[in-house]
Amino acid sequence: MKYKEKTASEIIQMIEQDLCSISEICKTFKISRKTFYEWKKEKPEFKEAVEEAIDHREDVMIASARIGLKQLLEGYIQKKEKISYIPDKNDPVNDVEKCRVVEKKFCPPSIRAIKYVLDREERKKEKQQLESWEKRPLVIEVQDEETRRQLMILKGNGFRSGGSLNPEIVAAVNRELEENKKMESEELKVKNEELKNEQDKLQAQPAAAPVEKPKVNLYPFLPPGYTSRTD
């Protein structure tokens, strides 16, 4: 069957409305599934329209699911109508409505729906926590230089065994260790120089002169014939 714009438009409409599956659509228009997928492959505009129809259909389904879930979580009112009919006096072939009874029933929230939402939220939090842990850098503190060297070799080999047998990895690790030692030595030297300069500045400052305390007369009032010595 040849590709026709009208047929393609009707197929897109059926897909968007979610009326039938692809197989049922193909049977309706008397085309094979192979023809349908060939049209998608050969006609970019048809492929794009099909994908947009599927996306729209899924959006509608998700929106409907959310509305239904919201009703289950909050509870909803269910209406039930009972209609009675009687033969029409003027037209015995047809019936006319006699009475209509509307019953309203409140459906309470669904415990299963509430549990589903809470479990989903809990799984989401666990996933976020696991992802945050995975993003954290791996920090390993070692006490001796050889253990540090072996860990660096393991890292250089992609955390696989056998890295110590690779001379290129071992040489690269040794160079890195030597560079780290030089940097640490230079940093220590700079700190020692700064500390020495601070000490020299303190020693260069003149000593403060001692402050002479004023003499205080401990006995300002003495009886006649007595004298006070304050020196």
Image: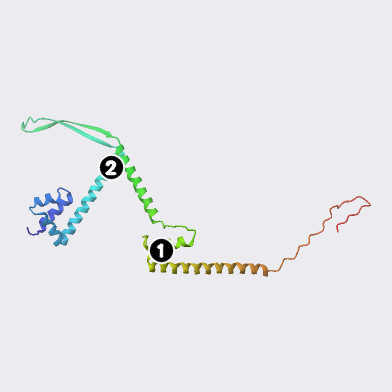
Quadrant of the image containing the N terminus:
bottom left
Horizontal relation, residue 146 to residue 223: left or right = left
Q: Residue at left 12%, top 59%?
A: 38
Q: Give the x, y percent position of residue 118.
A: 34, 42
**Residue beneath the point at 11% across and 32% down:** 96
Cα–Cα span, label 2 and label 1: 54 Å
Q: Residues within 10 Å of mark 1 (few under 14, many from 20)?
A: many
- Quadrant position of residue 40: bottom left
Residue positioned 66% across, 67% down in the render: 202
Q: Which one is nearer the viewer's eye here, 169 or 23? A: 169
Q: Residue 99: x, y in percent?
A: 16, 30
Task: Determine crowd level at label 2: few under 14, some 14-19, many 20+ residues with C-alpha closer than 10 A.
Answer: some
Report the residue marked by disc 2: 69
Task: Give the residue at the far right of this rendering.
Answer: 225
Q: Classify residue 188 as left or right of residue 27.
A: right
- Residue 128 location in percent, x, y? 36, 51
**What residue lies at 55% left-to-right and 67% top-to-bottom?**
188
Q: Earlier in the sequence, mark 2 or mark 1?
A: 2
Q: Secondary structure at mark 2?
A: helix
- Residue indicated by mark 1: 153
- Nearest to the observer: residue 46 or residue 104: 46
- On the image, the x and y values in percent for residue 30 come to 7, 52
